[in-house]
Amino acid sequence: MVASSQSQSQGRGDWPAIGIDLGTTYSCVAVWRQDRNRVDVIANDQGDRLTSSVVAFTANEGIVVGDAAANQAFSNPANTVYDVKRLIGRRFSDDCVQQDMASWPFKVVAGRDDRPMILVRSRGEERQFAPEQISAMVLAKMKETAEAYLGVKVKNAVITVPDYFNNSQRKATMDAGTIAGLNVMRIIMEPTAAAIAYGLHKKPVSDQGRTVLVFDLGGGTLDVSLLNTDPGKEIGAPLFDVKAIASDTHLGGSDFDNAMVNYFVRRFIREHKNTDIRSNQKAIQRLRTAWERAKRILSSRTQTTIEVDALHAGIDFHQTITRTLFEELNKNLFRKCLVALKQCLRDAKLDMSSVHDVVLVGGSTRIPKVQNMIKEFFDGKQLCRNINPDEAIAYGAAVDAASFIRESKMEPPLTMLLDVTPLSLGVEVDFGDMTVLIPRNTAIPTRKEQVFSTYHDDQIDVVIQVYEGESAKAAENNLLGKFVLTGIIPAPRGVPNINVTFDIDQNGVLNASVNDMATGLENKITITNENVGLSMEEIERMAQEAER
Ligand code: ADP
Ligand code: MG
């Protein structure tokens, strides 16, 4: 159905090596830090970890790439190029190219051998660019972002593409990398990269292998993929096989945005009896930008306001918008997401119960309704989403880039952050202090024991409260669970020997147990990493706070 996930490498690599998610709307770059044993997602010169995949050609500044290009789009639409991922490696006469072209404000013409060429004016001069050249400009920006962060030149990279990309689309993406001055060590598939980010290629497999469903809802596309790791796989074979793909090439964040902007425009017309707003492109664009910001807020809050001064004909636009209304107005689009999901399972002839892991990818999966729909569909199953969904692909690509280099240098495979405890684990003792049993970054599986005693004379029970976090005060950490041991033989304080054991298995499941050495009385609790639910960002923040 599709070619192997690993295109031939262009040669042996060396550090540093980066992973790039070259997205339709946003791109992201990440790197494996050998020194820190973790992945860093890299922020650009604006401080953003995502960079708009937009290239603008301007009269004065020449070529502008990224968010600066996106921001000037409405004053220079014909020379602001986006969505090139929809063009790369395709023919001008392809149906999808012809259809997409109709909605783009920039011009695409037929070049040599039916190749699509993008026609722009740059510094007052008409020029033509191949999609590979435009993508190369985005890739060069990502390369520079990484170089500024690492302080060294970067050459080696792994770049991701959708799993449905054919050979010419993959080849064109590789060429774009070469044009950008990168050595593309290999191209891997986006869902594979996301699964690698979660370390799913290393998790134990069942007899039929491990089945992973990746649900990627981005700015303009939905890609649902079912992957499988085969327990009997030969060494050197791709980490995952693709069992089925279901895509909707025009369903994503910008469709939700369109629906909302239309709604606001209708309201504006009704309230102000002014229909001219429809033809005021600048007003529509400003409204869209304000809404997009509001949409992000609605992913964490249930209500927000949109304010655009002098939107049209001197009229200010003020509107309170609730999450409920957003969900209501996009009901049908959300439903379409489930249609693709079901289709994918049907094509693979799989039941949802045979899916081991569900991975959420793409900025639009930050929408609570989308998360809930999928969770409900999978019967309340915990979803992999603790890596930021719009960064997971670059994250996995960075891990893969590092693995590639280690392999070529015959170094042992890397231990990922996900194979270690992200936060210290301990219990609360006297005066609310935290006693750590398993320090942060301990490789799992692991087992630690410590003997405690009673605090009062004749105390007959002890409460064990299990916390994770870096603060010396238990209350400032995250309470994972508590349990009680009763029936201790009355004795002066400090005499009984109470043994507490923490045991973390391969899957990150913590078994905490307590036993009174005198009586043999025991109690225990099981804490799965799934009910912890801290995101990587929170973990980082907590670690930094504690360091301070
Ligand atoms: P791509 O389509 O290039 O893969 P992303 O996966 O980064 O891009 O998704 C971009 C989309 O995610 C945009 O439509 C953006 O509006 C949306 N998005 C980003 N953050 C949020 C959020 N917090 N809530 C809702 N939508 C979001
Ligand atoms: Mg994407």
Image (cartoon, grey):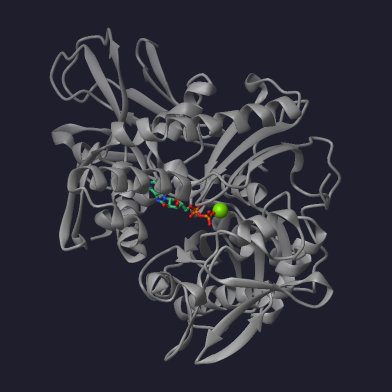
Q: Residue furthest right?
A: 234
Q: Quadrant of residue 340?
A: top right
The quarter in which the N terminus is drawn is top right
Front residue of 213 and 284: 284
Above or below for 439 versus 499: below
Residue in the picture at 23% in, 22% down: 495
Above or below for 363 versus 39: above
Residue 437 visible in the shown view: yes
Q: Is residue 406 left or right of residue 258?
A: right
Q: Is residue 46 left or right of residue 407?
A: left
- Count the marks: how many? 0
- Residue 516's spot in the image, x, y percent? 34, 16
Residue 449 visible in the shown view: no
- Residue 26's spot in the image, x, y percent? 50, 61
Residue in the picture at 37% in, 40% down: 534
- Residue 274's spot in the image, x, y percent? 23, 52
The quarter in which the C terminus is drawn is bottom left
Q: Quadrant of residue 102?
A: bottom right
Above or below for 463 versus 137: above
Residue in the picture at 74% in, 69% down: 172
